[in-house]
Structure formats: C-alpha cells, structure tokens
Image (cartoon, grey):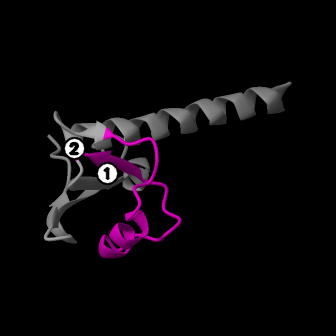
Amino acid sequence: MFRTALLITAALVLAGCASRGTQDCEAIAGPGWSRLSATPADGSELLVRANLPDNAEVLWFSQGKDQVMVCDPSNSLVNPGCGGSTAYQFERKAGAWVSRGVLLPVCD
C-alpha cells in the first residue's frame, strides 16, 4: 500500500516538473510561435547546431516555414522556481539555417 502511494506521488511530481518545462518553453517562444507536433525535417542538423544530443527530449516551435525554435526544458527540472529552459532560434536564409541566438527566461 505504501509503495503504491509512493509511486503515485513520484509520478505526479515528475509530471509537474515536465509541465513546468513545457510552460517555460511556451513562455520563451511567446506569441506568434506554434508548437510543432513532430520534429522538423532538418531537426537533427538543428540539434547539432544547438549543441544538443540527437536523442534530446526537446520541444519544437515554428513561426512560418523559415523560422524554427528548439527548446530544451531539461534545465527547468534543475531550477523549478525560475524555469531554466533554453531555446535556440534558427532562420532559413538562402536555403541554409542561420542561428538567431539563444533565448533564456528572465527570472525575478
């Protein structure tokens, strides 16, 4: 009985942390960005450019077909009070992806 209660509590805590990371990424993206349901075709290339592993559990956003953002919510689990997710924004120019920089949440 105690073991079952402990497993349920752990699952709820982890789900809360995961949703916090999703909220952080959505806040960084802001208005005008749409969350993608799947990794874009050039996702592996963009993960390399963002210095993230190919198997990273990230969230993808787009603003039209030529702007993509990849957000890594894993740091939000380390610092849940302040967020901590990191996003990398890319723009396609002349057929090649160009980095538009790293985006971080602002903490009070």
Q: Amino acid at mark 1?
A: Ser
Residue 78 shows in this picture: no
Q: Position of residue 76 (x, y in %)?
A: 37, 48
Q: Is residue 6 above or below residue 38?
A: above
Q: Amino acid at mark 2?
A: Ile
In the picture of the structure, the residue carrying the numbered disc 2 is: 28
| 68 vs 30, nearest the viewer | 68
Say if residue 70 shows up in the picture. yes
Q: Nearer the viewer, mark 1 or mark 2?
A: 2
> Can you say whether 17 is above or below 75 in the image?
above
Q: Residue 90: x and y, percent?
A: 21, 62
Q: Which residue is mark 1?
A: 85
Looking at the picture, tell me which residue is in the foreground, 100 or 104.
100
Q: Residue at x 17, y 68 (%)?
A: 99
Q: Residue furthest right?
A: 1
As drawn, which residue projects farthest toward the front?
A: 95
Residue 47 is covered by the magenta coloring: yes
Q: Is residue 25 above or below residue 31?
A: below
Q: Is residue 9 left or right of residue 69?
A: right
Q: So how many labels did they put on this image?
A: 2
- Which range of residues does the magenta coloring cover? 35-64
Sequence order check, earlier mark of 1 and 2: 2
Which quadrant of the view contains residue 103?
Answer: bottom left
C-alpha gap between disc 1 and disc 2: 8 Å
Image quarter of the N terminus: top right
Q: Residues within 10 Å of mark 2 (few under 14, many from 20)?
A: some
Give the left or right position of residue 13, taking residue 42 as reference.
right
Please name the residue shown 22% across and 43% down the image.
Answer: 29
Q: Residue at 73%, 32% (x, y): give it.
A: 6
Q: Check whether the beta carbons of the residues at disc 1 and disc 2 lie within 8 A of each other.
A: yes
